[in-house]
Amino acid sequence: MRASYTRDPRIAGRRDRRYLIVVPSVGQPRDGDPRAGYLLWDDVAWTFAHVRLDYDLEGAMRRILAAGLPAHLAERLRWGE
């Protein structure tokens, strides 16, 4: 079994293989991209598409600070870490 990594937005899969796909998250990404992320799977074409969307990052940061949480938790959102 061979493992590989890609940031390609669209991936063609094969039905005879198994996949582990790590999907970006909203609010606590770890890949350097602060946008929200999700995955679309087309079970007919057997393709996977990573989708990234902008969201109110500054508003989220303000709400973190307003909740009394440490500033580094708000700041890390900006860098996607």
Image: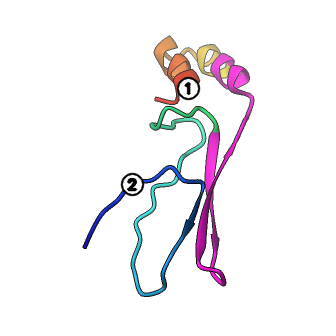
Where is residue 67 drawn, in percent x and y?
60, 19
Task: Look at the image and name its color scheme.
Answer: rainbow
> Disc 2 on helix, strand or loop?
loop
Q: Which mark is residue 77?
A: 1
Q: Residue at x 56, y 26 (%)?
A: 77
Question: Toward the viewer: 54 or 72?
Answer: 54
Three-letter code for the amino acid on which mark 1 is drawn: Leu
Residue at the spot x=41%, y=71% of the render? 19
Estimate the x, y position of residue 21 in percent, counting from the top left: 45, 61
Residue 54 belongs to magenta span: yes
Q: Which residue is mark 2?
A: 5
In the image, taking residue 27 as reference, residue 59 lies left or right, namely right
Q: Furthest-left residue in view?
A: 1
Tag count: 2
Give the CA distance from mark 1 to mark 2. 23 Å
What residue lies at 55% left-to-right and 65% top-to-bottom? 11
Q: Earlier in the sequence, mark 1 or mark 2?
A: 2
What element does badge 1 sit on?
helix
Residue closest to the eye, 63 or 9: 9
How dense is the environment of label 2, judged by Cα within 10 Å: few (below 14), some, or many (20 and up)?
few
| Residue 34 image-quadrant placement | top right
Magenta extent: 36-62
Left or right: 64, with 71 as reference point: right
Of tags 1 and 2, the one toward the viewer is: 2
**Residue at figure coordinates x 72%, y 36% from the top left:** 54
